[in-house]
Image (cartoon, rainbow, N blue to C red):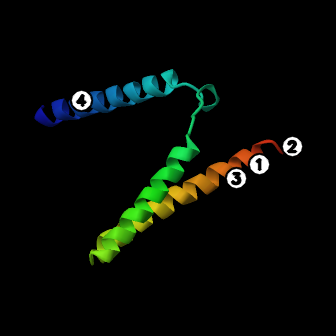
């Protein structure tokens, strides 16, 4: 009897979780309904600040922290490049 009750509880919990997941998916808005605005000038300023910070850290001998700051700057710069490319190509028609 004990195993049967735990199996029923587990089944009910799984079913409840599945229903909650379906409810969340059903209420989600389509991707085209939302728009995202990015300020590229702010991102460029962040890149410049991070690179300046990396240079300062290198000057003081904190090479690992400088490498981390440069990696963050490079990641932001890659994102800027992706956004600019998407903007350029969004106007093209096939």
Task: Name the residue: 38% across, 25% down.
Answer: 20
Task: Mark 3: give few (<14), some (14-19) or many (20+) Cα within 10 Å.
Answer: few
Residue 32's tag is: none
Count of numbered marks? 4
- Tell which circle, 3 or 2, labels the residue nearer the N-terminal end: 3
Vertical arrangement, residue 73 with respect to residue 64, above or below: above
Task: Name the residue: 55% across, 25% down.
Answer: 29
CB contact under 8 Å: marks 3 and 1: yes
CB contact under 8 Å: marks 3 and 2: no
Residue behind mark 3: 85
Foreground tag (4 vs 2) = 2
Q: Position of residue 60 (x, y in %)?
A: 27, 75
Q: Position of residue 34 (x, y in %)?
A: 58, 28
Q: Position of residue 64 (x, y in %)?
A: 30, 74
Q: Is residue 73 left or right of residue 10?
A: right
For marks 4 and 2, give the CA distance.
Answer: 56 Å
Residue behind mark 2: 93
- Tell which circle, 4 or 3, labels the residue nearer the N-terminal end: 4
Q: Is residue 3 left or right of residue 21?
A: left
């Amino acid at each position: 009897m004990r195993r049967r009750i735990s199996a029923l509880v587990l089944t009910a919990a799984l079913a409840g979780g599945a229903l909650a997941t379906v409810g969340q998916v059903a209420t989600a808005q389509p991707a085209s309904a939302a728009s995202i605005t990015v300020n590229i000038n702010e991102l460029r300023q962040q890149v410049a600040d991070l690179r300046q910070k990396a240079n300062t850290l290198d000057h003081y001998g904190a090479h690992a922290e400088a490498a981390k700051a440069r990696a963050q700057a490079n990641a932001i710069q890659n994102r800027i490049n992706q956004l600019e490319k998407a903007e350029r190509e969004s106007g093209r028609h096939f």
